[in-house]
Image (cartoon, coloured by chain):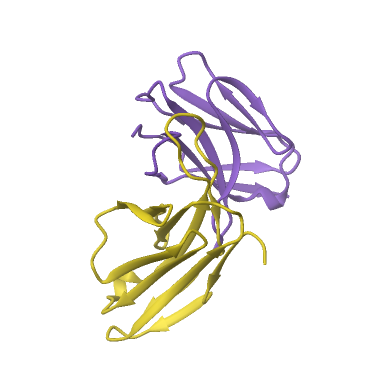
Chain colours: A purple, B yellow
Amino acid sequence: LAKTTQPISMDSYEGQEVNITCSHNNIATNDYITWYQQFPSQGPRFIIQGYKTKVTNEVASLFIPADRKSSTLSLPRVSLSDTAVYYCLVGEGGGFKTIFGAGTRLFVKA
Amino acid sequence: ETGVTQTPRHLVMGMTNKKSLKCEQHLGHNAMYWYKQSAKKPLELMFVYNFKEQTENNSVPSRFSPECPNSSHLFLHLHTLQPEDSALYLCASSQDMASGGPYNEQFFGPGTRLTVL
């Protein structure tokens, strides 16, 4: 399973765009990149998933360069309620083993 | 009830007690998971079940015993636990993982906060 590396923490202000980058140098051909969000004392919640280029949904965008060795989660116009831990996961769809790294703790300030 | 539910939400037990955690999913999924999250640590995958069959045991001590009677229910039986087992125990479910294709989204329950005295 590909290992992921993310910044430990990030600070932002309300209304700003936040970009969190994840490195996954050993990503395999069949691997997808998935991001989850977790609030304190709650289970993680799926945000977005992608394989290459750009994926956008109502919550976020995911940018994946051609070499797929990194990915960037983009949160537009964050609010205080976006304060959470964000996890980047890399894995093959057919595999059950799920490795959550330390994640990135995002603090959004007023 | 919708989504993934877990009971109890909080549990305090002594090291000699026997207790069970329950998870139920109402999403029609066939894969279910147990995770452990200790304070300020990443989630650790413990067990995975697919169509009621255990497919993953991530070197979990035998004092944790999972049970999956059907695709909608998952239990974690606890006995002779240690204080270091105190953590948030999370259950999740997903569609069955056919080989290839996208990574299936996991839906998590609210967790059981376990304290071992």
Tell which of B61 and B41 is nearer to you. Answer: B61
* Residue shown at the point (59%, 45%) measured from the top left: A46
Residue B56 position, x and y percent, is 32, 51
**Displayed quadrant of residue B20:** bottom left
**Displayed quadrant of residue B80:** bottom left
Looking at the image, is B112 positioned above or below residue A8? below
Tell which of A13 and A44 is nearer to you. Answer: A44
The answer to whether residue B9 is visible is yes
Looking at the image, is A62 positioned above or below residue B40? above
* Residue shown at the point (48%, 60%) measured from the top left: B91
Looking at the image, is B90 positioned above or below residue A64? below
View extreme (top): residue: A66
* Residue shown at the point (51%, 26%) measured from the top left: A71
Residue A56 position, x and y percent, is 68, 28
Residue B28 position, x and y percent, is 59, 54
Residue B58 position, x and y percent, is 29, 53
Q: Quadrant of the N terminus of chain A?
A: top left
The total of numbered circles placed on residues is 0
Looking at the image, is B108 positioned above or below residue A71? below
